[in-house]
Image (spheres, helix red, strand yellow):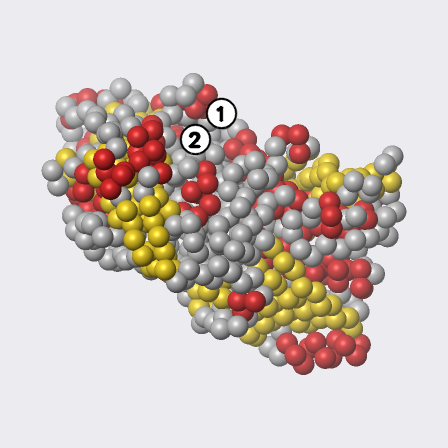
Amino acid sequence: MPAEVIGKPIDRVDGRLKVTGAARYSAEFPVKNLHHGWIVQSTIMSGKVASIDTSAAEKTPGVVCVMTHTNAPKIGTPQGNFGSGGVFAEQRLPLADGVVHHAGQHLAVVVADTIERARHAASLVKVTYDDVTTSLPTLREAMEGASEPGDWFGEQLQYKRGDVDAAISAAGKDGVVFEGTYETPAETHNPMEPSATIAHFEGDNLTVYDATQWIVGTQAILANVFELSKDNVRVICPFVGGGFGCKGFIWPHTILAVMAARMSGKPVKINLTRAQMFTSCGHRPETIQKMTLAAGKDGKLTAIKHETTTYTSKVAEYVEACGQSTSRLVYKCDNVFTPHKIARRHVASPTFMRAPAETPGMFALESAMDELSYALKMDPLDLRRANFAEVNGISNRAWSSNFLLECYDVGADKFGWKSRKPEPRATRDGDHLVGYGMATATFPGLRFPASARVRYYADGKVVAGSSTHDLGTGAYTVFTQVTAESLGVPVENVTFELGDSTLPRGPLAGGSNSSATVSEAIVNAVDDLHKKMIEAAIADAKSPVNGIPADDVEARDGKVIAKADDAKSEPFTAIIARAGKPFIEGSASAAPTAEMRKHAFQSFGAHFVEVRVDELLGRVRVSRVFSAIDVGRILNHKLAKSQIQGSVVMGIGMALMEHTVFDSRTGRPVTDSLADYAVPVNADIRDIDVYFTDKADPYLNRVGCRGVGEIGITGVAAAVANAVFHATGKRVRKLPITPDALL
Ligand code: MOS
């Protein structure tokens, strides 16, 4: 039997394609007669288009058409949802009218034969506006008229359990009450690959190459907007150069590319510029979070009040639900209140960004826990241990598996937490103040419905597939491993296909669900394949297992074998060859089961961070990070580690650098390049080490894995801020922690 392959740190199966440039991203597909669409965006945040003069652009050589709200083809309303696949990110259709709701709103698309001609012609489109708004209220100013929405994805946004106020006043007498307000800025995903769509009609058949985290969602939305059958819409996306959420929902530029293709009669590509990415596919909105924690002298929490204030745009319903899967469940506490208030602002629509809600939410909760630990004169790690939640406090369900305490222990040990002196400013190294900080990490363990197929060929090769995605995460590789191990064949024999809507239905690549979701579908498809192999063999007079009842024959390691007599066996390849088929296929769907409702699925972890702060310059260096993470069974240690390291890097960026700044006069992001929007580079990053508990989750799926893509960023910014406090004695409650905050 081939050795176990799940868990092995094998190299990416698509690694060679990537380093040789052979991996094709959406904007890179060669399509004959491809034309280019260049988007003209609004330069104001709110008002009306008074006139849009396209005459000069239309006369430019190579221009086929200029599409505006006055001449755009009519389209239908997107009907998507999570069930049927596909959510359009905004309530308003692109080019629906001349009303402007945010700076950077798409007002026209110029289609030309070359990108240079399209871009030049776009520069000649003259737009005038009426009723222009020239002042963007801050989030605080915008709170007048804010709403208190009832729910978000079926979860209570104004959640309450127990009596928070009574617990807070009781703790005021014989315990400790801590109150603090934390702020996180708007942030932008900035994947390496900007979004791009190529739309190509051939008769009624539409082929779309789209940089997307949701192939079947894009297919569903385009089918209903353009009134096509889903069978006539093919979405192709074999590689995604990072998404982090900004390619999850379907955004206007994708629909515009198809509209432009329909209007021009040419295949059209729209490739967003880096600057356009700041207004065209979401961002993480700013949050203001007021935390009130009450605890007894023993450190046990008696109340958590987590009040979130954030915003959405005028054309999207998005809630950065900071209190949801943070303060409601990370710690044991009987009295919890997590209200959310949402303002509507004239900014581009926000959306999910890596661990949406948990990332800003855990900055607030884990900073507040650190502050509480000083108020209690208790070690911050001991405070967490004292408040370990044995069950999910919202549902009172048992965790499917939870090794958070092991993460605390191993993390503290490997990091050297014991050597931490409790007092701030107690450790110096040359010019640097050295500080240690820690925080808990958490993210839900999700699994969605999906399908997969496994084809076993007569030559022993296996090709499996599902229309799932590889965002650079390693999905190709881990699904190859899951397929190989469930079949009991060498990993080299297996190819996994994804990124094409003609494959069996895959899930949205969001909420870190894909590994848990697609693995289950693969294992079920392998069962189906095995069943078919047995059926074919026992019915075949030439098979050594001919005539044996199916229940007395098993299939494993690429063979059918009589249970009573090992000698009666034959390889699948023989069965397929005799059947005269190129391959035999197994396929299956997998959906979350009623049984799963008995458990709560949540991943946890702990980050330990060392910072070195140059007091004279106010410069913070994150010199060391140790992250201990419990995400169930690890499918590939190398890739999983890489996911956590990447997440930690993003968390360091959040802590120290990232900030999308909107100009208060125009509403435009002024940081709309990678020169002005700072993210960590290699020189900013030192040691990041990762430990996985690597214990199979017995209930989420048959493989035992939970998602690993998002948990790594949660808590990092708090751990950094906590370390900065420990180093300097300065508590920074507003991100990013730039030098001015420390001088
Ligand atoms: Mo993620 S923000 O769920 O793509």
709 lies left or right of 129:
right
Who is closer to the viewer here, 397 or 251? 251
Name the secondary structure under disc 1. loop
Who is closer to the viewer here, 580 or 99? 99
Looking at the rendering, which quadrant does residue 577 occupy? top left
CA separation, marks 2 and 1? 8 Å
Label at residue 20: none
The residue indicated by pointer 1 is 11
The residue indicated by pointer 2 is 477
Whether the residues at callouts 2 and 1 have beta carbons within 8 Å, the answer is yes
Image spot of residue 324 (x, y percent): 53, 63
Image spot of residue 120 (x, y percent): 34, 33
Residue 44 position (above or below residue 61): below
Callout 1 amino acid: Asp
643 lies left or right of 499:
right
Looking at the rendering, which quadrant does residue 18 occupy? top left
Q: Residue at x 50, y 71 (%)?
A: 146
Callout 2 amino acid: Thr
Nearest to N terminus: mark 2 or mark 1:
1
Q: Is any part of residue 644 visible from this angle?
A: no
Image spot of residue 233 (x, y percent): 20, 42
Image spot of residue 692 (x, y percent): 60, 40
Name the secondary structure under disc 2. helix
For ligand 1, tell me if the residue under mark 2 lies within 8 Å.
no
Q: Which residue is drawn at 50% across and 26% down?
A: 10
Q: Which residue is drawn at 24% across and 45% down?
A: 67
